[in-house]
Amino acid sequence: IWGSGTGSEATITFTVDASGGDIPAQFISADKAGTGIAPELPVIVAGGLVDTAVVYADRDHRWATVAGSIVEGSSYVQVANDDKGVADYTLTVEADQETELYLLIDWRVGDDTNTEGPDLTLAMQWVDTMGFVDTGAAIGIDEGNDGTVNQQFQIYSLAIDANEPITLLEQNN
């Protein structure tokens, strides 16, 4: 997760979900790097991507509209919202079996609007370069933990091989 906020700041997160079943947390690893990163380390939440689950390691934002989505019940990696502005941020993930990696990108990325999906021609071109595909699905978050959906996240997917680290890059907008 690169964080949510105002202006050109936006949010990205991802989940790891195996074909035919979720990968237990002990088979997923994550590590981050960058200049000035927040002290919170990535937290792997086993099977926990459900409505009202906490989105960030350092905020009380909650997942919303997850029920019935392609990522419902997936294990996911919680990272610090404060890392959203780190220009050289990287997050490396690895699973011990072939799996589908889901990357959730805030609709504000690229054009700073929340009325349609992110514009990846203006930011985060690495998503396309790496081969992520837009699934056409989205889920929301409740930034105030008050039952209101404040932001939407488009879901992208990429099939990854077992034991092959994948390094995700910065938000870059």
Image (cartoon, rainbow, N blue to C red):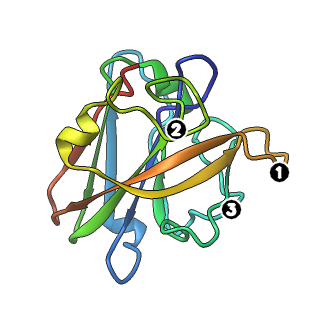
Residue 163: give x, y in percent of width and height. Answer: 16, 61
Tag 2 residue? 106
Q: Position of residue 142 (x, y in %)?
A: 72, 45
* Residue 64 in view here: yes
Residues tagged 3 and 2 counted as in contact (Cβ below 8 A): no
Marks 1 and 2, how far apart at CA: 19 Å
Q: Could you say whether the residue bearing mark 2 is in a helix, strand or loop? A: strand
Of marks 1 and 2, which one's residue comes earlier in the chain?
2
Name the residue at the bottom extreme. 20
Residue at 21% over, 70% down: 98
Q: Residue 21: where, in percent of width, then height? A: 39, 81
The image shows residue 84, relative to residue 36, as above or below, that is below
Of the residues shown, which amino acid type is indicated by label 3?
Asp
Give the residue type at disc 1.
Answer: Gly
Residue that appears at 53% across and 29% down: 10
- The residue at which mark 3 appears reads as 51
Tell whether label 2 touches label 1 (CB within 8 Å). Answer: no
Of the 4 image quadrants, the one containing the C terminus is top left
**Local secondary structure at mark 1:** loop
Q: Nearer the viewer, residue 81 or 102?
A: 102
- Say how many tags the image has: 3
Residue at 30%, 65% in the rendered image: 100
In the picture of the structure, the residue carrying the numbered disc 1 is: 147
Give the amino acid at mark 2.
Asp
User: In x, y percent, where is residue 58?
Assistant: 61, 35
Distance between mark 3 and mark 2 Cα atoms? 17 Å
**Residue that protrudes farthest toward the right in the picture:** 146
Left/right of residue 119 with respect to residue 124 in the rendered view: right
